[in-house]
Amino acid sequence: MARSSKSVARTLEDLTLDSGYGGAADSFRSSSASLCCSEAHGGNYWHLTDSMHSRHNSLDTVNTVLVEDAEILECTGQCAKLPELEDVPWSLGEVASALSKDEEMSLPTPQQDVLHRLSVLVSRALVRVAKEAQRLSLRYAKCTKYEIQSAIKMVLAWTVSMNCISGGLSALSLYNMSTEDDKFTRGKSARCGLIFNVGKFFRWMVDSRVAVRIHEHAAIYLAACMENLFRDVYARVLRSALLERDNGIPKFTVETLEQAVNSDAEIWGSLQPWQHLICGKNANGVLSLPEGLTLQRDHQQQRAGKSGEGNTYSQSELRSIEQCLLATRVGSISELSDLVSRAMHHLQPLYMKNHNNGTPMHQKSGMIHWAPEAIYTLCYFMHCPQMEWENPNVEPSKVTLQTERPFLVLPPLMEWVRVAVVHTEHRRSFTVDSDDVRQAARLLLPGVDCEPRQLRTDDCFCASRKLDAASTEAKFLQDLGFRMLSCGRTDLVKQAVNLLGPDGINSMSEQGMTPLMYACVRGDEAMVQMLLDAGADINSEHPSVFPETRQATPLTFAVLHGHVPVVQLLLDAKANVEGSLQDGMENYTETPLQLAAAAGNFELVSLLLERGADPMVGTMYRNGISTAPQGDMNSYSLAAAHGHRNVFRKLLSHTEKGKGDVLSLEEILAEGSELEGRSMSQMDLIRTGKAKLKALKEAMYHSAEHGHVDITIDIRSLGVPWTLHTWLESLRTCFHQHRRPLIQGLLKEFSCIEEEEYTEELITHGLPLMFQILRASKNEVISQQLAAIFTQCYGPYPIPKLAEIKKKQSSRLDPHFLNNKEMSDVTFLVEGKPFYAHKVLLFTASNRYLNLLKVSHMFRLFPLNIYVVFPFLCALCKIWILSYQLVMQYLYCGGTEALHIRNTDVMELLSAAKFFQLEALQRHCEIICSKNINTDTCVEIYNHTKFLDAPDLASYIEGYFLKNMVILIELEPFKQLLYDAPPDSPGCDILRDLEKTLAIRIQSIHLSSSKGSIV
C-alpha cells in the first residue's frame, strides 16, 4: 500500500514537472517555518530538510503551464491597458544620439521606423515608472530621487534597474560637481553628461502631475534612467540570436526588434501595453531567473573553493532552488513561508549588488524580514485551491481538484519578493508587512487595486523578533498611545501620554513622527489644538535620517499636505515660520515657503509671506560638494521651475519689513564699483539687492530650462541680464510653441548678450536653432533680425583673404613656343580652330592633361596627333578659344604674372582651370573673383562658384553674405538664393553652408585660444 502511494505521488510529480508545474518546498505538514532568511539560513549554503528529501518535491507548488499561454494571452487582451503617450520628453533625434553615444555600439543609426517603435515601447516603461512614483510621492506630497529610484526598481527587472540607477547616480554626481560658473551658462543635460533634456523631463513630470512638487534631482534621475534604458534595450536586441546579420552588420528592422524583445524575459513585460506588470517571463510564457543570479555558477564557485561535500549543491538541489524562485502557486501557508524564507536567502546577492543606489547607510546594514500577516496576505494571492489535500492524516493522502483561481497570469515568487521588498525599503523599514504585499499585487495582477500608502499612526510600529520582551512591550504601549491620540477624544489624552513613554506627548514613532506631526498630516484642526493644549512641542524636528522630511516640523507637514487652517493655527501658536531654520544657520531642508511655492499654493504663500517668511532662503545639499552660501532652489526658483506665474509674481511683490528702500535691479547693475563712501546700512542694502539678483538669475535659469518662457520674460523685464543659455532655451520654446511676437522680442534682445558669453553652445545649439527659424519663417521682420544677429556674430573683422598658391612647374618652355606649329608635337581643336602644344610640358602640367593624352583613342583624330577639346562643354562658354589661350599662356609662362585677365573672362578661365586641375591658376581666378564681389554680383558669382565646385571661393562669398546680410536680406536675388533652392540640386543647401561658415568664424574669433588672430 505504501509502495503504491509513493508510486502515485511520484507519477503525479513527474507529470507536473514535465508540463511546467514544479515545486520546491517543505511539506505542507510542517508546523513551523522561519520568516527571515538571516535566522533560517545563516550559513553559506542551504541544507534541505528531511521532509524535503523524503518527498523530493512538493505536490502543492504549481508553476505556470506553458500549454495555457495562448489562453492566458487571450485573456490579457481583455485587461486594462496603459495610456499611450502623445508627447514624450524626448525626440527621435535624441534617441539616435543616445544610442550612438555608447562606443561599444558604434553601429549605423537605426531607421526612423525602428526608432519610433523603440520609442513607443520604452514610453510604456516611462508610464509605469511615473505611475509608481506618483503613488509613492503621495506619502510626503513631493517626488524626489528616492521615489524615482524605488519606482524603477519596482517596474524594471533586477539587472535592468541596476544599470538604470547607476546611470542616474553618475548623472547626478556630474551635476553636483558643476562649478559655480556652469550653473547658469550650461544646460542641466550638459552638466549631467546626458543627451536627453532634463528640463523636458521636469516639465513632463509637472504636466503629468507625478507630484505637486518635483525635485530637480528626480528629473535628472528619470532622464538618465530612460536614456540608459534605451541603450540597454538596444544592446539586448543587438546581442539577440534572432537578429539577422549581413557581413557582420545587424539587420535592424521593426520585426527583429519585436522578436528580440519578446524573447527577453528581463524587458518584455515592462514594455507591454497592459496596466499590470508581467515579469519573470517572456512572450512565450517561459519563466527565467534574473541575469544577475546564476545558481550553477555559484555552485561551481563553491565546489572550487570548498572541498566539503556538505557545502555544495547537488543537481537536484539546484533544480529545487530554481523551482522555489519560479513558483507561481502554493498549496499551504507553511509551504509559502518556507519558500519565502529560501527565496530571500538566494536573492540576497541581488540586493547587495543593488545597494549602490544612494540608499541611506542605516538601510543597508539590516536584513529584510517578513511579518506573519505579510505571509498570509501573499498566500491569499498565490494559494492554489484547485489542488487541495482532502485529508492529510490519511495514508495515502488524497488530492482533490477545486475551482480555478481568478488570476490566470500569476507572477513567480521572486517577483513578489522583489516588488514587496522595494516597498519596504522605500519606507525605510526592515519588515515586509501585508500592505507591501497588497501594493505588489496591485502592480503584478490584473484588475487589483488598493489605496496608496499614507502617513498614519497605525503604520508606525511593526513587531520585530530581535527585540526583547520589555522593549517589545514598550513599543506596543507606545503604539497604543498613538492610536488613542489619533481617535480625537480629549478625555484620553492623559492616559495616552502615560503610554507614550518618557518623552510623553512629544514621543516619536519609528517613522520619526510625533502625534502633532500626524495630526498636521491629516489636517485635523481640532486634534492639533488639543495636542498644543496638552503641551506638544510646536517646533519639534523630524530626525535627519529620513531624507524626504529631514528636520521637518509640524508646520512643514501641514504645508506639505496643503492644510491652510492648520497652518494658520500653528502660526498663531508661534510656530517658526521658517520651519527648523534658525537665524544664522545653514538650511539643509526646505522651508514651508519653499514647499508652498513649489506646489503653487497661492493662499499658503501669501499667508507665510505675511508672517515673515524669507523667499531668498535656499537649500543646502549634504553631498560633500561645496554649494552656494545660501543654498540652491529658493522660493523664486521653485515657483519658476514649476511654472507657477501667479505665485512668482506674489513673491516678487513681497518687500521685507524695514527694507523698503532696497536698490532696484537696474541700480545694482549700474552700481559697479562705486562702494567707497557708503554707510554700513547702504552696504547692507546693496548686498541684499545683489543676493536677490542672484536669486532671480537662478529662477530665470530654471524657468528657461523647463520651458516657462512667460516667467522668463517677466524676470528679464526686471532688468536681470540674459545669459546665452537662457536666451537660447527661451527662443527654442517660443519657436516650438509658434509664438511669433515673443520670437521677435527675443531676437531683438540678442544684442544685450555680451560677446564674453559666447560659448560652444552657440555653435552646437544656437546656430542650428536660428537657421531653422530662418528656414521655417518667411516673416520679413524675423529674417531681418536674424540677419543682424548673424552679422553681429561674424564680427567686425575683415573676411579672411584668399592667398595665391606658389607652385613651380617641373617643366617649362620658352613663351616663344606658345601655339607654334613648327615646333609642336600635339594639336588641339578648340571650337574648330587648331591650337599647337608640346607633350613634354602637358605631361607634367596636371593629372588631367596626363590622362587626356594617355587615352588618346577617345579624343585623337587618327592618324594625326590632333585632339578635340571641350566639344561637350562649348555650350557653357562662348569664348572657349580665348580661355584656352590663357590656360596655355599660364603653362608656357610658368605663372600668372604675365596674364592679363579681363573681369568678363575670369569665370570662363576659372572653369577651364578647374577642368584641367591647375590649382595655382584656379586660385588666381578666385582671387580676381573675390575682388569683383559686391551686392549686385555676389549671388551670380556664388551660383557659378557652387556649379564649378570651388569651395574656397564659396566660403569667401559666404563670409561676404554673413558680413553684409543686413543689406542683402532686402534684395530679391538673395532671398531667392536662400528660400528657392532648385529641386534638382538637393546637395546645395545655402543655409547649411552659411551655418557651417559662421560656426567656423565664431570658433576662430570667440572660442579659440588666439581670439581674432584669424584675420
Image (spheres, rainbow, N blue to C red):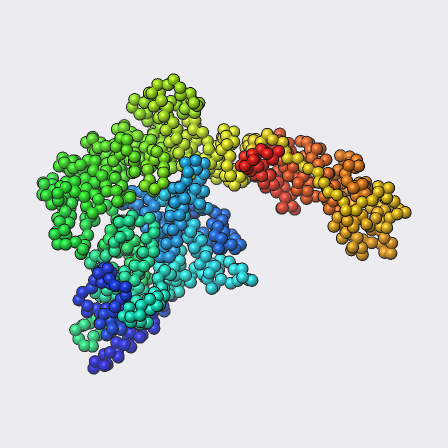
Name the spot of residue 212 as percent of width and height, x first.
32, 41
Res. 976 in view:
no
Left or right side of 948 for 788: left
Q: Quadrant of residue 10?
A: bottom left
- Vertical comparison of 594 with 37: above or below: above
Res. 180 in view:
yes
Query: Total marks drawn?
Result: 0
Judging depth in this view, the residue of 660 and 380 nearest the camera is 660
Judging depth in this view, the residue of 781 and 108 nearest the camera is 108
Q: Quadrant of residue 813?
A: top right
Q: Which residue lies at the image location 26% right of the left edge and 34% below the top edge?
A: 581
Residue sitting at the far right? 822
Left or right side of 601 for 122: right
Q: Which residue lies at the image location 37% right of the left edge and 51% below the top edge?
A: 165
Residue sitting at the far top? 677
Q: Which residue lies at the image location 24% right of the left edge and 78% below the top edge?
A: 6
- Vertical comparison of 262 with 680: above or below: below
Name the spot of residue 38 as percent of width and height, x first.
24, 59
Judging depth in this view, the residue of 141 and 553 nearest the camera is 553
Name the spot of residue 23 as percent of width and height, x first.
28, 69
Q: Which residue lies at the image location 33% right of the left edge and 34% below the top edge?
A: 618
